[in-house]
Amino acid sequence: MEAMDAHFWIGFFNIIILDLVLSGDNAVVIGMAARRLPDRQRKKAIIYGTGAAVVLRVALTLIAVWLLKIPLLKTVGGLLLLWIALKLLADEGGEADVDMGHGLKAAIKTIIIADVVMSLDNVLAVAGAAHGNFWLVLFGLALSIPILMWGSKLVASIINRLPWLVYVGAGILAYTAGQLIVEDPIVHDHIIRYAEFLSWLAPVALILLVLMVGHFWKEHRSNPS
């Protein structure tokens, strides 16, 4: 019984740490996507985005074993996350007089797509740390809600005060995308295992790529001529 209790509490604390680390990335996406909306619209985007993230995590938890069998799933997710990072960076400093209804819908769409990609790692990590304990899995899902909600509000508020932090957020997303790609079983078995240095070089290179391409794309959109 003591061994079982110890196992439970180890999983419990592991899940707290995993949620703090992995849900932080989702909070960055939600905060960045909602940062340019008015307060009321921003709150809606954060609430809907957080709700979508939780629902997605529940659904992904139920089909986690099946998801692991899909070839190149993490690579596709990583590439999609790179696109989101570029898009969020290019949109910074764009036209401010956008239609707010469209702006809200666009923000929620971006958040949901990113949540699908980024929740996968969180679900698999929490499920692994829980070692099949249903209550620990539920605890991990419940803990992610306040982290996403309050973390997103904080990120959006800080970026509005310090706009250059959007580059930091894009870099975080690019690094996360790189990790997803190098951790993909097929990519790891056919490439990374023969060149271990790529496991850290690829994410760093993608940060530089996203920041440079995103910056030039942003400049082009601001000055189309």
Image: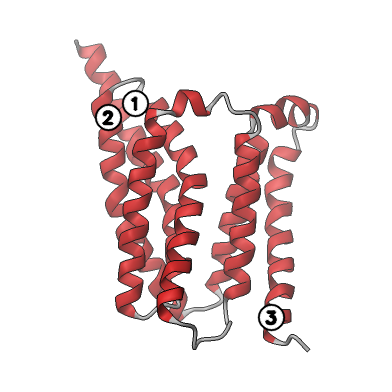
Q: Residue at x 31, y 37 (%)?
A: 140
Asked which quadrant contains residue 187, the reply is: top right
Q: Secondary structure at mark 2?
A: helix
- Viewer-nearest of labels 3 and 2? 3
Which circle's residue, 3 or 1, is located before the other in the chain? 1
Judge by depth and name the residue closer to the eye, 2 or 140. 140
Q: For mark 3, what is the residue?
A: 221
List x then y, in percent, for residue 180.
60, 41
Residue type at tag 2: Leu
The correct choice, above or below, for 78 with respect to 156 in the image is above
List x then y, in percent, for residue 145.
29, 50
The correct choice, above or below, for 107 with respect to 189 in the image is below
Distance from the alpha carbon under mark 2 to that under mark 1: 5 Å
Which circle's residue, 2 or 1, is located before the other in the chain? 1
Q: Residue at x 65, y 40 (%)?
A: 75
Q: For mark 1, what is the residue?
A: 130
Q: Secondary structure at mark 1?
A: helix
List x then y, in percent, for residue 114.
50, 53
Distance from the alpha carbon under mark 3 to that under mark 2: 47 Å
Q: Which class describes the residues within 10 Å of circle 2: few (<14), some (14-19), or many (20+)?
A: many
Q: Residue at x 57, y 67 (%)?
A: 88
For this view, does 166 lie left or right of residue 103? right
Quadrant that contains the C terminus: bottom right
Q: Residue at x 34, y 55 (%)?
A: 50
List x then y, in percent, for residue 87.
61, 66
Tell me if label 2 and label 1 are in contact, CB under 8 Å: yes
Q: For mark 2, what is the residue?
A: 136
